[in-house]
Image (tube, rainbow, N blue to C red):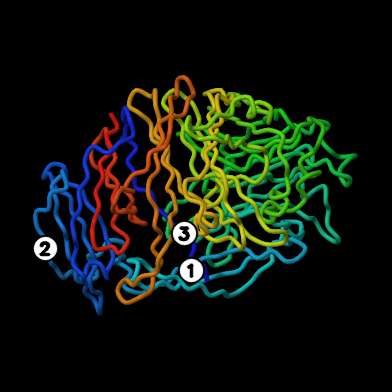
Amino acid sequence: MKPKLFFTFLFFISLHLAQAQKLSKEGTHEISKKANKGYLYEPKVDEAKNEITLTYVTRATGRNAKFEAYLFDMDFNFKRMEESEVPLEKIKGFKADKGEEYTVEAVTVEPNLLGTLILKSKTYKRKWNWFWGGYDTKISYGEKIKPKSDDGGKFQYIAHSEQPESGNILIFAGDKGTGLGNALKMTTEIHILRFDHDLNKVSDNLLKFDYPQTVVAVNTDDQDDDDDTDNDVLLLFAPLGGKAYKKSADPSAVNYTFVRVGKDGTVKERVSIASKAGIFNGNMFVTIGDDVLIMGATGDKTDDYFDEKFVAPVNMRDDEIEKFKAKGFQVVKISKGKVAFVSNNTLEDFDKKSQSPPSQKKNPEYTGRKFKVADIKLLNNGDILLAGQKYTKPKGGGHVMKFGNLGSVGGNSGGTEYEDIIMMHFAGNGILKASYGVRREENNKEAKTSANNQLIMESADGKSVYWTIMEMKGWKQEKELGESKYKFLMYPNVAKIDVVNAKIGDFVQMGQGKTEYFVNNKYPSLPIGKGQVVFLGENKNGKTLWFAKMPLE
């Protein structure tokens, strides 16, 4: 089976921009055979001591682990290596109060073929795994119930958000009524249900609409089971207006509604949005403090209803999204419970404002087809940068792995082929300033089947931005603590963007000299001070560490 790519960026927000994307200093150091066969447990930076520590797990048996810690000064000069043996209870990520194995009682949903809401209890059994330094999870399921409303009606499942801190679950469901069901009631009366892990109903808050509604997007379906934070849930509703709803439909197809729900199930915000297009696939939410950006592709008419293009429920809409040919891209900002702006940018706008690095011959453009988001950045001047990648799929195959509420990330997706990279550059009012199109540097088989990780870093004065694309040169299989693992051979490719004039410069490859170096898959950089970024990597066989400092001022 082809490996899936998982990549964690650990950059600090305080990083600034350089005058040019070039390395000011590099350093290398060989590690021991034991460290190379182990894994990098955790890098630490202590600026007060002028010290960088890279700690490797070299052995893990019983209740203790053995480590090798490599210490460097801030200029990457090697100082010493320290060996140690540490009890399990003191290892980062290990829950000392819960032990090597523990269980969590929770609840999930399992709608039937008709979409009727069914709750099911589940148990997480977690066991510490030294191979990757975290808990493995096995899930078993138990009792089922079919909740009913106060008048005995069933619920039509819409979406849910599991709350790992309490074991509770927040569910959004329409009231189907009794008998054969009431289609109008279950699309105008949305229940916000909260159940505990014993399947007891904790609360039931009603969200009423004057006209039938469908959920366009909700940011609940990708919460990490190990995340102990119960966050607000954001939803976007659109009026239904297909054949079955012509008589009862909202007269305006562009009358969208944004709803923010707290972890206790109460509605914290409800805001009407006058979309610039009837079809607005606003499936990207970005929170900035209490403000929210909603972004997504649009159609080209104001009288088309959302459900005339998207029929499937929100959690089963992937195929319809794949086939959708967008005519524009809309940005909505919600601030202080009101709409700050709604800006729709047409494909003609993208065509007029499209550009590429000066040395690149071809100019890839956003065409409204399949597009996967990699990173979104709100700049200090209010500009919005959205970086992503075009892709194609074979007919009848493939699946794109979701990336939180933004899109997807990496890996072989059933024949999915990733193509040109696009960054959309919007002004603070959502109007497109530029669309930067980039041809990928690496075009081998691995690069085509793995989405490129991307990162956007801003300068201190806000006039420039560094856009880093991690180029995939290939992958290799190796062993860590005796178990097989895939190592992805990626290097940073960096371009500077003039934010004020909306102009992109050429890309510069980092670590690709006579000896090739690739970033560490888990820790691609070190958080060292302000005004610089330090890439952390190694050569292909992993024996030689690589440090590369790129000044950002």
- Give the labeled residue for mark 1: 105
* Label 2 crowd (10 A; few <14 / some 14-19 / many >=20): few
Label at residue 82: 2
Q: Earlier in the sequence, mark 2 or mark 1?
A: 2
Q: Residue sitting at 73 percent across and 49 percent down?
A: 323
User: Where does the image place residue 443, in percent across and percent down from the top left?
Assistant: 51, 52
Indicate the secondary structure of the residue bearing disc 3. loop
Indicate the secondary structure of the residue bearing disc 1. strand
Q: Earlier in the sequence, mark 3 or mark 1?
A: 3
For the image, the number of numbered tags is 3
Question: Residue at the left extreme?
Answer: 79
Callout 1 amino acid: Glu
Q: Is residue 440 left or right of residue 304?
A: left
Q: Residue sitting at 48 percent across and 25 percent down?
A: 503
Q: Are marks 3 and 1 in contact (CB under 8 Å)?
A: no
For residue 541, above or below residue 457: below
- Give the labeled residue for mark 3: 5
Callout 3 amino acid: Leu
Q: Disc 2 to disc 1, how far (Cα)?
A: 41 Å
Q: Residue sitting at 62 percent across and 35 percent down?
A: 270
Snapshot quadrant of residue 89: bottom left
Q: Is residue 545 left or right of residue 280?
A: left
User: Where does the image place residue 370, in percent across and percent down from the top left?
Assistant: 65, 46
Residue mark closest to the camera, 3 vs 1: 3
Q: Is residue 501 left or right of residue 318?
A: left
Q: Earlier in the sequence, mark 2 or mark 3?
A: 3
Question: Residue at the bottom extreme?
Answer: 62
Q: Residue sitting at 44 percent across and 44 percent down?
A: 469
